[in-house]
Amino acid sequence: ENFKLTDLMDEDELLQEVKGMDIKLIQYLCGTETMSELLDYLCNPIPEDSSDQRRYKYPYIACEIICCEVTDIVRLICTNKALLKKMFLVLDVEGEKLDQRLLGYFEKVFGVLFKQCRENIIDEINEQRIEIFRKF
Protein backbone atom coordinates (compact mmCIF):
# COMPACT_ATOMS: atom_id res chain seq x y z
CA GLU A 1 0.00 0.00 0.00
CA ASN A 2 3.03 2.29 0.09
CA PHE A 3 3.24 3.04 -3.59
CA LYS A 4 2.83 5.97 -5.91
CA LEU A 5 0.59 6.34 -8.92
CA THR A 6 3.66 6.19 -11.15
CA ASP A 7 4.49 2.77 -9.69
CA LEU A 8 1.11 1.54 -10.89
CA MET A 9 1.47 3.25 -14.25
CA ASP A 10 4.74 1.38 -14.79
CA GLU A 11 2.97 -1.97 -14.40
CA ASP A 12 2.38 -3.77 -17.71
CA GLU A 13 -0.98 -5.20 -16.63
CA LEU A 14 -2.51 -1.97 -15.30
CA LEU A 15 -4.95 -1.37 -18.14
CA GLN A 16 -6.06 -5.01 -18.09
CA GLU A 17 -6.73 -4.70 -14.37
CA VAL A 18 -8.76 -1.53 -14.91
CA LYS A 19 -10.77 -3.19 -17.69
CA GLY A 20 -11.20 -6.23 -15.45
CA MET A 21 -12.71 -3.93 -12.82
CA ASP A 22 -10.26 -4.76 -10.02
CA ILE A 23 -12.15 -3.32 -7.05
CA LYS A 24 -9.15 -2.15 -5.02
CA LEU A 25 -7.54 -0.58 -8.06
CA ILE A 26 -10.73 1.24 -9.07
CA GLN A 27 -11.17 2.50 -5.50
CA TYR A 28 -7.60 3.79 -5.50
CA LEU A 29 -8.00 5.47 -8.90
CA CYS A 30 -11.26 7.06 -7.74
CA GLY A 31 -9.52 8.88 -4.93
CA THR A 32 -9.74 12.59 -5.67
CA GLU A 33 -6.00 13.13 -5.18
CA THR A 34 -5.14 10.16 -7.39
CA MET A 35 -7.48 11.29 -10.16
CA SER A 36 -6.10 14.82 -9.90
CA GLU A 37 -2.59 13.46 -10.35
CA LEU A 38 -3.75 11.34 -13.29
CA LEU A 39 -5.24 14.41 -14.95
CA ASP A 40 -2.00 16.32 -14.33
CA TYR A 41 -0.29 13.93 -16.75
CA LEU A 42 -2.92 14.67 -19.37
CA CYS A 43 -3.36 18.39 -18.94
CA ASN A 44 -0.23 20.09 -17.66
CA PRO A 45 2.53 21.16 -20.03
CA ILE A 46 5.34 18.64 -20.06
CA PRO A 47 8.60 20.12 -18.75
CA GLU A 48 11.44 20.12 -21.29
CA ASP A 49 13.72 18.02 -19.08
CA SER A 50 11.13 15.28 -18.45
CA SER A 51 11.88 11.60 -18.71
CA ASP A 52 10.42 9.61 -21.59
CA GLN A 53 7.98 8.05 -19.14
CA ARG A 54 6.66 11.47 -18.10
CA ARG A 55 6.64 12.71 -21.67
CA TYR A 56 5.08 9.71 -23.41
CA LYS A 57 4.01 6.82 -21.20
CA TYR A 58 2.19 8.49 -18.32
CA PRO A 59 -0.06 10.73 -20.44
CA TYR A 60 -0.94 7.72 -22.62
CA ILE A 61 -1.72 5.51 -19.62
CA ALA A 62 -3.77 8.25 -17.95
CA CYS A 63 -5.81 8.66 -21.14
CA GLU A 64 -6.38 4.93 -21.51
CA ILE A 65 -7.46 4.53 -17.87
CA ILE A 66 -10.20 7.12 -18.33
CA CYS A 67 -11.13 5.74 -21.75
CA CYS A 68 -11.82 2.32 -20.22
CA GLU A 69 -15.16 3.98 -19.36
CA VAL A 70 -15.28 2.65 -15.81
CA THR A 71 -18.46 4.22 -14.46
CA ASP A 72 -16.98 5.27 -11.12
CA ILE A 73 -13.99 6.96 -12.76
CA VAL A 74 -16.09 8.83 -15.32
CA ARG A 75 -18.64 9.83 -12.69
CA LEU A 76 -15.89 11.15 -10.40
CA ILE A 77 -14.48 13.43 -13.08
CA CYS A 78 -17.91 14.58 -14.25
CA THR A 79 -19.20 15.45 -10.79
CA ASN A 80 -16.07 17.02 -9.34
CA LYS A 81 -15.76 20.65 -10.50
CA ALA A 82 -12.06 20.86 -9.68
CA LEU A 83 -11.26 17.75 -11.73
CA LEU A 84 -13.41 18.89 -14.63
CA LYS A 85 -11.76 22.29 -14.59
CA LYS A 86 -8.32 20.65 -14.49
CA MET A 87 -9.17 18.57 -17.53
CA PHE A 88 -9.61 21.71 -19.61
CA LEU A 89 -6.22 23.13 -18.59
CA VAL A 90 -4.68 21.59 -21.70
CA LEU A 91 -6.59 24.22 -23.72
CA ASP A 92 -5.51 27.13 -21.53
CA VAL A 93 -2.05 27.87 -22.87
CA GLU A 94 -1.73 31.59 -23.48
CA GLY A 95 1.31 32.40 -25.53
CA GLU A 96 2.35 28.76 -25.71
CA LYS A 97 1.92 26.25 -28.47
CA LEU A 98 -0.69 23.60 -27.79
CA ASP A 99 0.91 20.17 -27.31
CA GLN A 100 -0.51 18.06 -30.13
CA ARG A 101 -0.02 14.76 -28.32
CA LEU A 102 -1.79 15.97 -25.19
CA LEU A 103 -4.55 17.44 -27.35
CA GLY A 104 -5.05 14.04 -28.93
CA TYR A 105 -5.41 12.47 -25.51
CA PHE A 106 -7.72 15.30 -24.45
CA GLU A 107 -9.90 14.66 -27.52
CA LYS A 108 -10.22 10.99 -26.64
CA VAL A 109 -11.02 11.66 -22.97
CA PHE A 110 -13.37 14.51 -23.88
CA GLY A 111 -15.31 12.14 -26.15
CA VAL A 112 -15.75 9.58 -23.37
CA LEU A 113 -16.81 12.17 -20.81
CA PHE A 114 -19.09 14.00 -23.23
CA LYS A 115 -20.85 10.74 -24.09
CA GLN A 116 -21.39 9.92 -20.42
CA CYS A 117 -22.13 13.33 -18.90
CA ARG A 118 -22.86 15.83 -21.64
CA GLU A 119 -24.65 18.33 -19.43
CA ASN A 120 -21.77 18.62 -16.93
CA ILE A 121 -19.26 19.13 -19.74
CA ILE A 122 -21.34 21.83 -21.43
CA ASP A 123 -21.88 23.59 -18.09
CA GLU A 124 -18.12 23.57 -17.46
CA ILE A 125 -17.36 24.93 -20.93
CA ASN A 126 -19.89 27.73 -20.43
CA GLU A 127 -18.68 28.47 -16.91
CA GLN A 128 -15.00 28.64 -17.84
CA ARG A 129 -15.69 30.55 -21.05
CA ILE A 130 -12.86 28.69 -22.69
CA GLU A 131 -11.61 30.87 -25.52
CA ILE A 132 -10.89 28.07 -27.93
CA PHE A 133 -14.54 26.97 -27.86
CA ARG A 134 -15.80 30.50 -28.57
CA LYS A 135 -14.29 30.30 -32.03
CA PHE A 136 -16.67 27.52 -33.09
Image: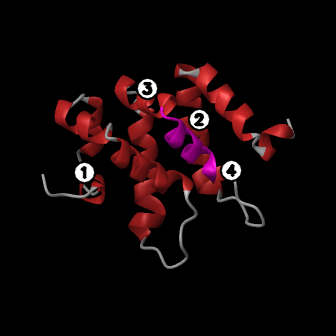
Mark nearer the N terminus (1 vs 3):
1
Local packing at callout 1 (Cα closer than 10 Å; few below 14, some 14-19, many 20+) is few
Instruction: Tell me the distance, in whole angstroms, between the alpha carbons under discs 3 and 2.
Output: 13 Å
* Three-letter code, disc 2: Phe
First reached walking from the N terminus: tag 4 or tag 3: 3
Determine the secondary structure under disc 2.
Answer: helix
Q: What stretch is highlighted in magenta?
A: 80-89
| Furthest residue in direction bottom, as rendered | 49
Q: How far apart are marks 4 and 1 (CA)?
A: 30 Å
Q: Quadrant of residue 124?
A: top right
Q: Name the residue under label 3.
A: 75
Q: Mark 1 points at which residue?
A: 12
Q: Mark 2 and mark 3 in contact (Cβ < 8 Å)?
A: no
Q: Name the residue under label 2.
A: 110
> Dot 3, crowdedness within 10 Å: few (<14), some or many (≥20)?
some
- Horizontal side of 28 relative to 99 (left or right) equals left
- Determine the residue located farthest toward the left in the rendered image: 1
Q: Which amino acid does label 4 sit on?
A: Leu
* Nearer-N-terminus badge (3/2): 3
Query: In the rendered image of this protein, does residue 109 appear above or below residue 99?
Result: above
- Judging depth in this view, the residue of 49 and 134 nearest the camera is 134
Residue 79 horizontal/vertical position (percent): 48, 28
Please say if 117 is above or below 77.
above
Q: Nearer the viewer, mark 2 or mark 1?
A: 2
- Circle 4 or circle 1, nearest the eye: 4
Q: Identify the residue position indicated by label 4 in the image.
A: 91
| Helix, strand or loop for disc 4 | helix
